[in-house]
Image (tube, rainbow, N blue to C red):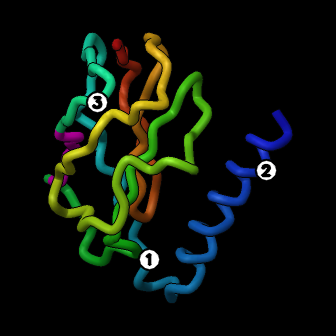
Amino acid sequence: MNYHLAVITHVMLVFLGAVLAVPLDLRDVFVPPVLYPATGTVWKIGSRHNVTWDISTPPSQITNKLGRILLAKNGTLDIEHPLAVGFDIMNGRQVVAVPPHVKPDADYQVVVFGDSGNMSKKFTITE
């Protein structure tokens, strides 16, 4: 548990550092809601999917346009195996593959990071 708390704290501090590096008058945080996966979604291990999020109301200045998508299980982020990194957050979607190391369960979420992190609804991963 302490390891997960330390990892989450580290990730939050990295993003906070990126935000604080921008002058106050230029900071706008973009918080696009994740649209897919949604409640009731089922992904199969090894399959590919388009994670999508709403880009209809972006601020004029986005602090960090480079995105990262992580898988979360029971609210714990898997930062060691990102699903995607380095894409433009304004694309509104990103193809990801379900990693082979995950265990089938119904308590998964994806988190889309740009200049903030947005969690999807819980969904299921099967074999």
Viewer-closest of 105 and 62 = 105
The vertical placement of 92 against 37, above or below, is: below
Q: Is residue 43 above or below residue 117?
A: above
Point out the tag, 1 or 3, that comes first from the N-terminus.
Answer: 1
What amino acid is labelled 3 in the image? Answer: Gly
Q: Is residue 56 found left or right of 26 in the rendered image?
A: left
Quadrant in which residue 71 is drawn: top left
- In the picture provided, is 39 more to the left or to the right than 119? left
First in residue order: circle 2 vs circle 1:
2
Point out the stretch of residues depicted in magenta: 50-55
Horizontal side of residue 98 vs 11, given as left or right: left
Q: Is residue 52 inside the magenta stretch?
A: yes
The residue depicted at 68 percent of the width and 65 percent of the height is: 13
The quadrant of the rendering that contains the C terminus is top left
Give the class, few, some or many, for how many residues have Cα within 10 Å of label 1's Cα (few <14, many ≥20).
some
Q: Which residue is mark 3?
A: 46
Task: Please provide percent x and percent y for residue 92.
Answer: 17, 53
What amino acid does circle 2 point to?
A: Ala
Q: Position of residue 8 (x, y in %)?
A: 68, 49
In 3D space, how far apart are the residues under numbered discs 1 and 3 (Cα atoms)? 38 Å
Q: Are marks 1 and 3 in contact (CB under 8 Å)?
A: no
Q: Looking at the image, do the residues carrying marks 2 and 3 touch, with CB atoms under 8 Å apart?
A: no
Picture coordinates of residue 103 (x, y %)?
49, 19
Pointer 3: residues within 10 angstroms few (<14), some, or many (20+)?
some
- Using the image, determine if residue 15 lies above or below residue 105: below
Mark 2: few/some/many CA within 10 Å (<14, 14-19, 20+): few
Could you tell me which residue is drawn at 56 percent across and 41 percent down?
78
Marks 2 and 3 sit apart, C-alpha to C-alpha, by 29 Å
For disc 1, the marked residue is 27
> Which of the marked residues, 2 or 3, is nearer the chain's N terminus?
2
Looking at numbered disc 1 in the image, what kind of residue is underneath it?
A: Arg
**Mark 2 sits on what residue?**
6
